[in-house]
Amino acid sequence: AEPGRNRADALSVAQWKEKIERALACPQAVGPIRNIKDEDPRPFDAIFIGGGAAGRFGSAYLRAMGGRQLVIDCWPFLGGACPHSACVPHHVFSDCAAELMLARSFSGELWFPDLREKLTSIKEVVDLFRKGRTGPHAVMNYQSREQLDIEFLLNAPARILDRHTVEAGGEIFRARHLVLTLGAEAAPLEAPGSELVGVHNYATLVETLDREPGATVVVIGGGKTAVEYGCFFNATGRRVIMLVRNRPLDMIPDRETRAYALERMLQQGIEIIEGADVVEIVGDSARRVARVVAATPDGPIEIETDFVFHALGERPRSRMAVEALGVEIDAKGAVIVDEALQTSAPGVFAAGDLIGSPMEMFKARKSGAYAARAVMGEKVSYRPRDWPDFLHTHYEVSWLGLGEEDAREKFKNVVVMKLPPDNPDGLNIGLPASDRTMLYAMARPHMSGFQKLILDGDSRRVLGAHHVGYGAKDGFQYLNALVRGGLTIDQLAEMDELFLNPTYFIQLARLRAGQPNLTNL
Ligand code: FAD
Ligand code: KPC
């Protein structure tokens, strides 16, 4: 039987939801949410400080191995930033961006309402998310307690006392090891006026947005979060001006794929100013944003707006561990760990966003689990490498391996297969097409996506894959593992596609796999 499943005091998901909502509304009224087996005589093998993806997965893994853990979080739920302010709201907004782009592209045609000149609400979507997010929160607590048998103390900030001891909720807890899983938070905008009402980052947007933003939005930054939120704001019908210090979407490794994604953003009306630096945000008499002043390569500009969104990267929450334990950090504030997730403080481990980039869920969950294995005495070695990646514009953009330029630098016989093919009509071609892009393929062909497979013609191995469309990132997770294992065009051609598939790589490979000397397609 699953541990905990039949316990008399088990809470249903609905009961967890109600409890979490009460605690979020008034943390003091609910107090520490305690699931600790005081009757268990064993000491804790580890206390995970922070119950986000890293702390929760580390806890689950350690528990699954038969160890005893405690996870402490100041929020009343496990799962951390992802369901509360990061991945989940980002996916809500990106879903809306995709839906709205479709609706605006076909505005007044077929069954689509006429959205021309119409703004749709940002605040309604934020409010909808805030109401809906406690559902996933509740599942996290239900799964953690009633199914995984994890011990936790929630709704209680933790304070590290020494390498074995933590204070939280008025109690002192000791463990053989500490695992620091405190995550990261939005880097601040260092400009006068950044404290004005109407200046938001991803976290304050969902916590404190108090009125509908006006018709012009300024987005500061050009990384994943800036682009993702900027595309959503744009899809609501607003003018979006992105002030980018360097290059937007710089992380997309393939030049052509990046260009396709960027061109679609520009075509949706997003204005991007590269080389821009915010000088000041000017407020009105009510301390609300009134305009943004920026220095650009073409001289200073002023933009009237009541809504500024900045996304300037993440800062690891390492201060408490530095002060209490003296753990070493790098220049960006990330806790330095070795391949066994061991910090510079003996017996203290760290995982997740706290240990720096890549700050992604796979790394948080995986490093949490590896730290658990290390705590339990296993000799482990984890350094993230060769991971697949993605982001959202109005589309989903997925990639793995090398871009074409890097591939050509490293290999002398690079072969490329792509859709649309190089042809006189450019990107105005009704393929690729698959779920969610069929209407574009028929009526707005340049919008139906872009994809590219890069091969080494000598070894016949896949070097990279790149995709702009929808539904591909799931496949990229598995494809990445195959590519790491040396996947060849011949093996790809043996696979069975579920046509019309978001990634056309299997069928493209099959068209060419008969060639002894591979050529482009
Ligand atoms: P967190 O989830 O931040 O957990 C840290 C926990 O520590 C928190 O729960 C916090 O409450 C707790 N804590 C802090 N201080 C204390 C204290 N003193 N005492 C007790 N508890 C404390 N990644 C993806 O893979 N896919 C995505 O789509 C994606 N979208 C993102 C969108 C945005 C806008 C952002 C910012 C990030 C996104 N990420 C995404 C990254 C992902 O959210 C993080 O990598 C992941 O949440 C990190 O997990 P973590 O456990 O390391 O940290
Ligand atoms: C959407 C969802 O699964 C909740 S957010 C994930 C948090 S965790 O499982 O702890 O990584």
Image (spheres, rainbow, N blue to C red):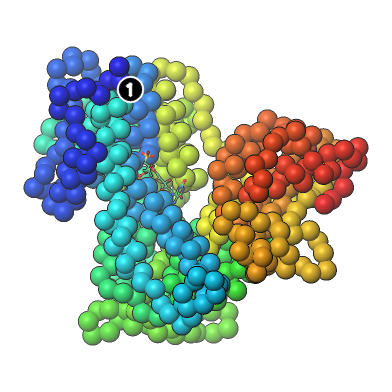
Q: Is residue 377 above or below residue 52?
A: above
Q: In this rendered view, identify the residue nearer to me: 350 or 104.
A: 104
Residue 483 lies, in percent from the top left, at 68, 36
Please indicate, yes or no, whether residue 339 appears anywhere in the rendered image.
yes
| Residue at the (52%, 57%) spot, across then down | 392
| Residue at the (25%, 79%) spot, across then down | 287
Please name the residue that numbered disc 1 is placed on. 63
Q: Give the total number of marks visible in the rendering.
A: 1
| Residue at the (59%, 73%) spot, across then down | 266
Q: Is residue 352 above or below residue 47?
A: below
Residue 34 lies, in percent from the top left, at 16, 33
Disc 1 Cβ-to-ligand 2 distance below 8 Å: no
Instruction: For mark 1, give the secondary structure.
Output: helix
Residue at the outermost front position: 110
Q: Is residue 318 above or below residue 111?
A: above
Instruction: Quadrant for the N terminus, please.
Output: top left
Residue 373 lies, in percent from the top left, at 42, 22
Based on the displayed image, in which of its 4 quarters is residue 110 positioned?
bottom right
Based on the displayed image, in which of its 4 quarters is residue 67 positioned?
top left
| Residue at the (18%, 40%) spot, across then down | 15
Residue at the outermost top position: 41
Residue 295 lies, in percent from the top left, at 50, 79
Q: In this rendered view, identify the residue nearer to me: 403 or 474.
A: 474
Q: In this rendered view, identify the residue nearer to me: 277 or 434.
A: 434
Dot 1, crowdedness within 10 Å: few (<14), some or many (≥20)? some
Please indicate, yes or no, whether residue 349 appears anywhere in the rendered image.
no
Residue at the outermost left position: 29
Amino acid type shown at disc 1: Arg
> Would you say 173 lies left or right of 363 here?
left
> Would you say 238 lies left or right of 481 here?
left
